Image (cartoon, rainbow, N blue to C red):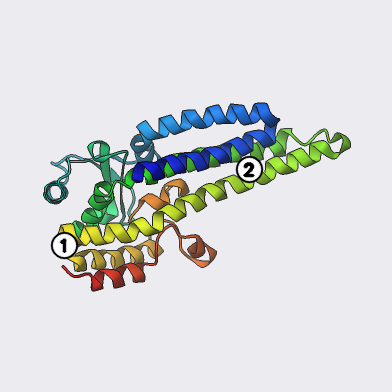
Amino acid sequence: MQNLKALSLMGLLSIILVFIGSAIGGKSGAFLFFIISLGINLFSYYKSDKIAIKMTRSTPISEKQAPELYEIIRKLTKRAGLPMPKIYRTPSPQPNAFATGRNPSNSSVAVTDGLLQILNKRELEGVLAHEMSHIKNRDILIGTIAASMAGAITMISELLQWSFIFGMGGDDEEGGGIAGLAGTLLLAILAPIAAMLIQFAISRSREYSADQTGAYLAGDPDGLASALLKLEKASHKIPMQVNPSTSHLFITNPLSTKTMARLFSTHPPIEDRVKRLKQFKK
């Protein structure tokens, strides 16, 4: 099922690229961008974890540097029947974490510096159990592909916008040039929005599922609930410099949730997640 969802996601994001290509160069442009989309799909499938790690500026952390972290993850992997993931640290004072990879055998877990500083062992185990649940539920492939594809589409769209501003505004014979440029600019603006909407649709439901599975793995829903409340409070006070295309990977939204941004949040409200955890029966 998760592989089918991943293929559907690749198809949807590929269609966006083909539409962009068609607006730029007609049939030949559509074909060119179709070829580009195939390349991006293959690359994002096999290298999605490395892309996410690089986009978040995460680096490996050794067991000597974080013995408690390794101890907790090793215990959770045994409970879940999973192989040991690669472990990374993300250089940010905001407490947060994410999991990435195309399958359990090629998975990684990253934690921010702030997470290790602000949480006690019980809360840290809850957060790590949540991330191991993403790996166990095999939804890290979808989230990571969404991050790499949305990042690629956003980059292409930004290039189109700049090329429109600086190099494409000259000829407008019979109004065709203006219409074509307007269409290209419109797609350049809408494409990243469409890519983000796809991310959001994937992210919200999977967070509830990972919370429930994580509570089961940790054997303590209160630890994760307490951690989520701490993480939400800290996210409002401590900014995090992160590529928006990767925001849905994190356990809580690392970006500001003020005003209109909350309407397009990649995560369910923390109060709803905590309420569900409180009702969870061990």
Tell me how far mark 2 sits from mark 1, CA to CA.
46 Å
Q: Nearer the viewer, residue 78 or 162?
A: 78
Amino acid type, callout 1: Arg
Quadrant location of the C terminus? bottom left
Query: In this rendering, does residue 239 appear at all?
Result: no
Dot 2 alpha-carbon crowd within 10 angstroms: few under 14, some 14 to 19, many 20 or more: many
Amino acid type, callout 2: Ala
Q: What residue is drawn where x is 21% and y is 55%?
A: 129
Query: In this rendering, does residue 83 appear at all?
Result: yes
Q: Which mark is residue 236?
A: none
Determine which quarter of the picture holds residue 206: bottom left
Determine which quarter of the picture holds residue 35: top right
Horizontal side of residue 8 vs 274, given as left or right: right
Residue 188 appears at what percent x and percent y? 63, 43
Task: Give the number of the mark in front: 2 or 1.
Answer: 2
Q: Nearer the viewer, residue 205 or 76?
A: 205
Q: Nearer the viewer, residue 242 or 153?
A: 153
Q: What residue is drawn where x is 62% and y is 38%?
A: 19
Q: What residue is drawn where x is 53% and y is 37%?
A: 14
Element class at badge 1: helix
Horizontal side of residue 74 vs 32, given as left or right: left
Q: Tell me the residue that label 1 is attached to.
A: 122
Q: Which mark is residue 188?
A: 2
Q: Nearer the viewer, residue 144 or 38?
A: 38
Horizontal side of residue 29 vs 219, given as left or right: right
User: Looking at the image, is mark 2 or mark 1 earlier in the sequence?
Assistant: 1
Q: What residue is drawn where x is 37% and y is 61%?
A: 235
Element class at badge 2: helix
Residue 225 appears at what percent x and percent y? 25, 67
Number of numbered tags placed on the structure image: 2
Relative height, residue 9 to residue 117 (above, below): above
